[in-house]
Image: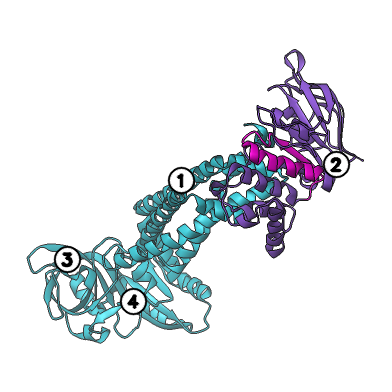
Chain colours: A cyan, B purple
């Protein structure tokens, strides 16, 4: 059975090429769309997800961290009093900062102010400089992907203005992407307060690290009960809220998901059409098999083997091409993330797609009247 | 034992006043070791009769027994097993699988019977050797002559060791020389291997191979003729000669 399935598949090389091209394009299209979706998630939630904090204290009703509302520092002391809190630090994330580039034009930035000693909420993927360099007054760290285009920054030591205050670039990160395309500018909490004109006792968020072994949900509930006018969220809860706001709230996520679903549908149609056409072309052979005593199950297996084999070959080509596209995208601000989870999901999706596409062909093959073999 | 026993067989298409009778009250017995030719004009019902005897078409009423087992009334799920167990088909257009070699075409029939791997390869080679194609195991149908293709089809039909061979116009697409080889093989199967061989044909050149010739006329058995005497080669070209 496998022999006839495989031989028939490879016998008509042009048809096989058409089938594989259709599936490969479907896989690439789906991988790219879902990769963009993952890139959006990463860009919109990275500042929270990479914070290394266990819990966040945010003003009530905050839908995303860039919308932080200042509250009084006194809440920090209440948090620190809890025996399950190992560390708690003030934190700032704000879209309310404008950088002036060397050419005099303005660019909005995402200002991230963190406690340099807290080990939470700081930059990641540092390529030049260090967190310690941010102790210098007015020191900032920016991302290489945005530095030149958005801020006119090309090297360490360059000076720009943020909210009309001097800012010296002391280091670079690479790959800290921001959904809004307003580049992340990391600085110390104190510097951030200065850039934003906040009072010394004002903060936007608290980031908390729990003691080892503490029950996060219990701690979160307890702190939420003790603090007024704020919400206490686990990092994953805030990541979810952040992702929902930016990716779905703005409609961008829906757009790429719809495109991915359309890619899958197009893939199913292409595969269904080619497998069906191949079945019709071999209809006399299927009739002969039925006359010889083959059961419908035997015919199912031939058609499914051909579909799944086409899917496997196309998957290898498609995922390889998608990984190359992903790799190239990492050099830009729009990341197409094709991770192993997406690759595995696409594998399952491809096989399902090919099996689904076989249904019409299977119906055709099994409805053959075997008496057709006696007709000229 | 009768290989095939047909009694009062009727096949209609449609129902009521618009019903079309393809076969009417057919009574026919085919014996093991017999080569029977089924002849008739186009539309006379011979293909319908062969289809019913081959368990690929259901009769409307009557009886059709294959080695004593009633097949009329069996479901479409039950019939493939009867075909697989008892019947080998040979088609006018050969119906070989173009993507498979001669050996693989025979192996398909063995695969249906559950014979696979090296055993299937060996058995397929033996069968092709038997029909004189031992040197063509790896040839594709496109590289074979019409006669060779039909011999591959015969080897395939024999793979499941069926007790009945149904051949539809087995020589129609062949030249005289190839027709002789094919008919000699069919005759050998009937007489030496004790198979019941039924061949539908319009080919008068092969009449002398038949142990019996049955004519179908308008869906009924017209007349039956016993074996014809040995004939000299005629001007119209007779295929072979009875021995």
- Separation (CA) of disc 4 from disc 1: 47 Å
Q: Is residue B214 left or right of residue A219?
A: right
The crowding category of the residue bearing disc 2, from other C-alpha atoms within 10 Å (few below 14, some 14 to 19, many at least 20), is many
On whether disc 3 and disc 4 are found on a single subunit, the reply is yes
Image depth: mark 1 or mark 2 in front: 2
User: In front of the other: label 2 or label 3?
Assistant: 2
**Region of the chain picked out in magenta, as a range:** B161-190
Nearer to me, A323 or B1: B1
Q: Are marks 3 and 4 in contact (CB under 8 Å)?
A: no
Q: Residue A121, labelled with which disc?
A: 4
Q: Disc 1 designates what residue?
A: A270
Residue B125 picture quarter: bottom right
Report the residue marked by disc 2: B33
Residue identifier under label 3: A149
Chain label for disc 4: A
Give percent across and percent down for residue A164.
11, 69
């Amino acid at each position: 059975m496998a022999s006839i399935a495989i031989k028939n598949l490879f016998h008509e090389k042009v048809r096989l090429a058409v089938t594989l091209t259709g599936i490969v394009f479907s896989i690439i299209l789906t991988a790219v769309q879902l990769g963009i979706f993952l890139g959006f998630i990463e860009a919109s939630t990275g500042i929270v997800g990479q914070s290394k904090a266990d819990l966040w204290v945010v003003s009530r009703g905050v839908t995303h961290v860039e919308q932080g509302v200042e509250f009084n520092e006194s809440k920090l002391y209440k948090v620190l009093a809890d025996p399950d809190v190992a560390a708690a630090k003030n934190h700032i994330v704000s879209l309310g900062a404008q950088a002036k580039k060397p050419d005099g034009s303005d660019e909005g930035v995402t200002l991230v102010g963190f406690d340099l000693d807290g080990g939470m909420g700081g930059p990641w993927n540092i390529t030049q400089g260090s967190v310690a360099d941010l102790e210098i007054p007015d020191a900032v760290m920016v991302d290489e992907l945005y530095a030149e285009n958005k801020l006119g920054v090309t090297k360490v030591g360059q000076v720009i203005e943020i909210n009309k205050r001097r800012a010296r670039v002391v280091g670079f990160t690479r790959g800290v992407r921001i959904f809004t395309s307003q580049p992340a500018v990391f600085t110390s909490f104190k510097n951030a307060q200065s850039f934003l004109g906040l009072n010394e006792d004002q903060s936007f968020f608290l980031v908390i690290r729990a003691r080892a072994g503490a029950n996060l949900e219990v701690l979160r509930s307890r702190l939420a009960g003790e603090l007024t006018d704020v919400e206490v969220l686990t990092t994953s809860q805030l990541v979810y809220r952040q992702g929902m706001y930016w990716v779905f709230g703005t409609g961008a996520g829906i757009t790429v998901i719809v495109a991915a679903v359309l890619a899958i549908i197009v893939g199913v149609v292409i595969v269904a059409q080619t497998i069906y056409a191949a079945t019709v072309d071999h209809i006399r052979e299927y009739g002969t098999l039925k006359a010889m005593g083959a059961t419908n199950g035997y015919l199912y297996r031939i058609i499914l083997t051909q579909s799944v084999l086409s899917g496997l070959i196309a998957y290898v080509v498609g995922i390889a091409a998608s990984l190359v596209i992903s790799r190239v995208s990492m050099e830009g601000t729009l990341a197409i993330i094709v991770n192993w989870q997406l690759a595995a999901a696409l594998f399952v999706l491809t096989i399902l797609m090919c099996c689904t596409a076989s249904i019409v062909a299977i119906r055709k093959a099994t409805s053959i009247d075997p008496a057709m073999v006696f007709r000229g | 034992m009768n290989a095939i026993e047909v009694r009062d067989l009727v096949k209609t298409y449609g129902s009521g006043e618009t019903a079309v009778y393809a076969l009417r009250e057919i009574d026919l017995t085919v014996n093991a070791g017999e080569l029977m030719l089924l002849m008739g004009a186009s539309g006379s019902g011979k293909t319908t009769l062969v289809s019913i005897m081959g368990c690929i078409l259901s009769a409307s009423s009557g009886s059709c027994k294959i080695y004593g087992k009633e097949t009329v009334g069996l479901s479409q799920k039950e019939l493939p097993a009867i075909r697989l167990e008892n019947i080998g088909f040979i088609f006018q257009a050969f119906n070989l699988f173009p993507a498979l070699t001669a050996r693989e075409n025979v192996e398909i029939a063995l695969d249906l019977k559950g014979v696979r791997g090296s055993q299937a390869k060996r058995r397929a080679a033996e069968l092709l050797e038997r029909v004189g194609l031992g040197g063509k195991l790896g040839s594709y149908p496109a590289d074979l002559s019409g006669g060779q293709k039909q011999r591959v089809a015969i080897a395939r039909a024999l793979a499941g060791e069926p007790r009945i061979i149904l051949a539809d116009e087995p020589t129609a697409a062949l030249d005289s020389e190839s027709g002789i080889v094919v008919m000699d093989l069919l005759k050998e199967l009937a007489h030496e291997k004790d198979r019941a061989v039924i061949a539908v044909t319009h080919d008068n050149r092969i009449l002398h191979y038949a142990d019996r010739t049955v004519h179908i006329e308008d869906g009924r058995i017209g007349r039956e003729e016993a074996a014809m005497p040995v004939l000299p080669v005629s001007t119209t070209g007779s295929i072979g000669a009875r021995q």
